[in-house]
Every structure is written in C-alpha cells, then in structure tokens.
Image (cartoon, rainbow, N blue to C red):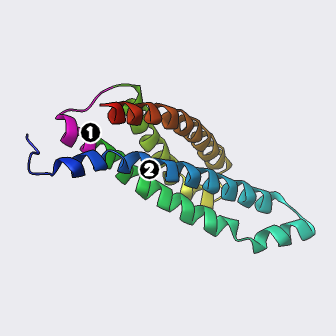
Amino acid sequence: MSFDYIPKDLKFALNFFHPALMWVLFALALYAGYQGWQWRRARTAEGELKKELLKGRYNQKHYLSGSILLALMVLGTIGGMTVTYINNGKLFVGPHLLAGLGMTGLIATSAALSPLMQKGAEWARVTHITLNTVLVGLFGWQAVTGVQIVLRIISN
C-alpha cells in the first residue's frame, strides 16, 4: 500500500509524535505510581496521619491518571506502529516493538484488576503493583531505545 498522497514533510513530522507522547506518558506513569503509593499509605495509616493523607484524595487522582495513561498508551502504541508502517511499508519486529506491545498488555491487565482491588483483594493489589513496576522499568528501557530510533530517523 502506498501512502504517496501524504505530504513528505508531514510523514517525517509524524515520526516524532509517538516518541513525544511516550515521554509524556512515562512522566504520567511515574506520577500515577506516586499517587498509588500515597493511596496505599493512606489506606494503611492510622490516626492523624490517615486523616491528613485522605485529604489528598490520592485514590481518585491515581484512578484518573491511570485511566488516562491506559487510554493514551494504547492509542500511542497503535499510532507508533501506524506511522512506522506509513513511512516504511512495514513494521520492524524487534525488541522495541515487542516490549511496547508487552507494555500495552501489562497496563491493560493492571487496569483490569481495579474492580478486584476495590473489593479488597490484596492479591490483586500486589499483582497490580508488580505489573506496574515492571511496566515502569520497561518504559525506562523503551525511552532509551526510542531515542536511538529517533536519532536514526534524523540521521537519514
């Protein structure tokens, strides 16, 4: 399939949308993790500390930031693959793509645990935290490999 009808400058510029979005999402993932940590502290705290932490409404902030992160990560993954296909006529199946797809699966699975966590299932909380810790680790690695890809695009 040919995408010659898309202006060359636009096709080139599209290469940078996915990396820019992913850097924003990496920061959002760290923020969501912080909110989740604070919510966990609030749930397990006692006395005045608990009252103080509950004022932060960390549960609502964590849920909202996590929901935004889920939606934009799925769309960003699809967008990155689409732009790669538009510009190259194929996907490059390698570690960056495979890890990105894995991350998309991790975040979807993590989000799917929310109803169980709301019912108090501690195993779901532990699994949620574990999946998201792996996700953030992969995100950091993806950031490095993504910069390498962007540098290759710029040099061509």
Which residue is denoted by mark 1 in the rendering?
Answer: 84
Q: On the image, which quarter does residue 43 sit in?
A: bottom right
Inspect the magenta stretch and tell me whether residue 90 lies in it: yes
Count the marks. 2
Percent coordinates x, y for residue 21 in the rendering: 44, 52
Percent coordinates x, y for residue 133 in the rendering: 62, 40
Residue 39 is left or right of residue 16, and the answer is right
Percent coordinates x, y for residue 131 in the rendering: 57, 41
Residue type at the position of mark 1? Thr
Residue type at the position of mark 2? Ala
Residue 27 is left or right of residue 103, and the answer is right
Callout 1 secondary element = helix
In the rendered view of the protein, which quadrant contains the N terminus? top left
Q: Is residue 27 above or below residue 54?
A: above
Label 2, residues with CA under 10 Å away: few <14, some 14-19, many ≥20? few
Q: Which residues are magenta?
A: 82-93
Q: Residue at x 30, y 49 (%)?
A: 13
Which residue is denoted by mark 2 in the rendering?
Answer: 20
Q: Is residue 53 above or below residue 127?
A: below
Q: CA distance from mark 2 to mark 1?
A: 15 Å
In this orientation, which residue lies closer to the viewer: 7 or 145?
7
Q: On the image, which quarter does residue 126 sit in?
A: top right
In the rendered view of the protein, which quadrant contains the C terminus? top left
**Seen from this angle, which residue lies furthest top?**
94
Callout 2 secondary element = helix
Q: Is residue 87 above or below residue 37?
A: above
Residue 92's tag is none
Q: Residue at x 88, y 66 (%)?
A: 49
Inspect the magenta stretch and tell me whether residue 89 lies in it: yes
In this orientation, which residue lies closer to the viewer: 85 or 103?
85
